[in-house]
Amino acid sequence: MHSAQILTRISVLALGIAGVLACGQAHAAAFQLKENSVKAQGRAMAGAASAKGDASVVVNNPALMSTFDRTTVQGDVTAIDLSFEFEGSGYAASGTPLQQPLTGGNGGDAGGVSPVPAMSFILPLEGGFEYLTLGAMVSAPFGLKTEYDDGWQGRYHALNSDVQIIDLTLAASLELGPHFSAGLGAVIEHSDVTLSNAIDFGSALCANPATQALCFMPNPITGPFGPQKNDGEVSVNGTDTSLGFIAGLSWRPTDSVSIGYAYRSEVDHELSGEADFTVPPNVATILASTGQYVDTGAMAKLTTPAVHTLSATWLATDRFALMAEASHTGWSSLQEIRIQFDNPAQADSAEDYSWGDSWFYSVGGEYLLNDAFTLRAGVARDDSPVSYPHRTPRMPDQDRMWYAVGLTWNATENFSLDASYAYIDLVDTPEIDILSSSRSRLTGSYDGGANLFGVSAQYRF
């Protein structure tokens, strides 16, 4: 009966916080979101898989749940204020006799402010199960949000990109001795992806020998067809729910040293949904016989990467602690996004990513000011998986540096509040030089960065 009550409490909590996240905006402008712990954020994520007292270890290292001796509920939310502004130019029908400068503005600020919430629950068992600790957490481990003004220069490459990935993690930790514990969890991952861009039907008609003559009637200047004269749009949305797992180890050789290792598996998604085409009326008449560019079902495969994390925490004194962490993300699992349409007349649409694996390194520290307040700070290097030949307006990413500070207020013996601020600075200027399938070439650079504002609350029963 006791076990049934425990499982009921966990299930109700998990479903409740999943509903809260589903109604929110669980996305940001970076594909990998580390913002699941405000406390760790104040250390630039150093020690996230080895430091005690943070309920987000349900997903950062489930083995550490065994260090909790009281039922704990924690809620975190981080507001990501991201900015990406483009400066550059390009050509439509690049490399053809009809080449012309791209029209439109710079797209505005492609970023914005997005909240990323997380909620976690840890339950140490009693009696014959006292060596077992259960946990549940809802988080957003990956996300992407960029949005450009309609009609901007890079419209043929990207308009809106919205990737929302939400995890429900159910985990257990087993204490194997006074200094060692192991954890394992199941990840139920829901993905919702929307991608849109403009289509230069004019350039496509001019490049097709069967319709090329239309671009010279009566001439390329005054004719009704031609590059940038016949813009349409496509928006593709797909969703999927799939399974993965997490595992972790925690070794605490002394009271002052904690070492953690965590692994998060790849999760394979087969996104299914709809493709919505908007075609100018004069172009639709020409394409009617082909059966192309009509609304249809669509499918795409997406694999979120595996992540290995090694973390360490050292209590140098009764008041001061040092943390360090390194994580490896297997982004090489994402080589392309290929959209396959149910309409047999519509050819696949593929975007080449060819990303490489990446590393994240961080160091940080905490200082116990008094019984009520703890101060923390940290710095991190976050390498981008995106190389210059594959950088796109959907994600004009670059290597980044994190600079973070944080504060804990122990309001009572059972209740504490955390706050953090982190500034993310791009190491170098992201530059792009990309050619679309309709031969729209966009070149230029981005000015960007992000501010992270986090708050969290933890209650221990």
Image (cartoon, rainbow, N blue to C red):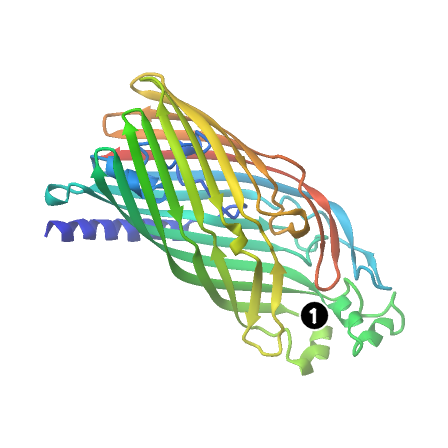
56 relative position to 173: left or right: right
- Between residue 229 and residue 1, name the one nearer to us: 1
- Identity of the residue furthest to the right in this view: 219
Where residue 129 appears, x then y in whole percent? 14, 45
- Identity of the residue furthest to the bottom in this view: 289
Amino acid type assigned to the residue bearing label 1 in the image: Pro
**Under tag 1, what secondary structure?**
loop
* Residue 34 figure quarter: top left
Number of labels in the image equals: 1
Where residue 291 appears, x then y in whole percent? 64, 80
* Residue 410 figure quarter: top left
331 relative position to 249: left or right: right
Residue found at x 10% / y 52%: 1
Q: Image quadrant for the C terminus?
A: top left
Where residue 454 appears, x then y in whole percent? 43, 34
Residue annotated with mark 1 = 280
Residue found at x 43% / y 27%: 406
Residue 25 in sight: no
424 relative position to 128: left or right: right
Residue found at x 26% / y 34%: 459
User: Is 426 placed above or below 190 here?
Assistant: above
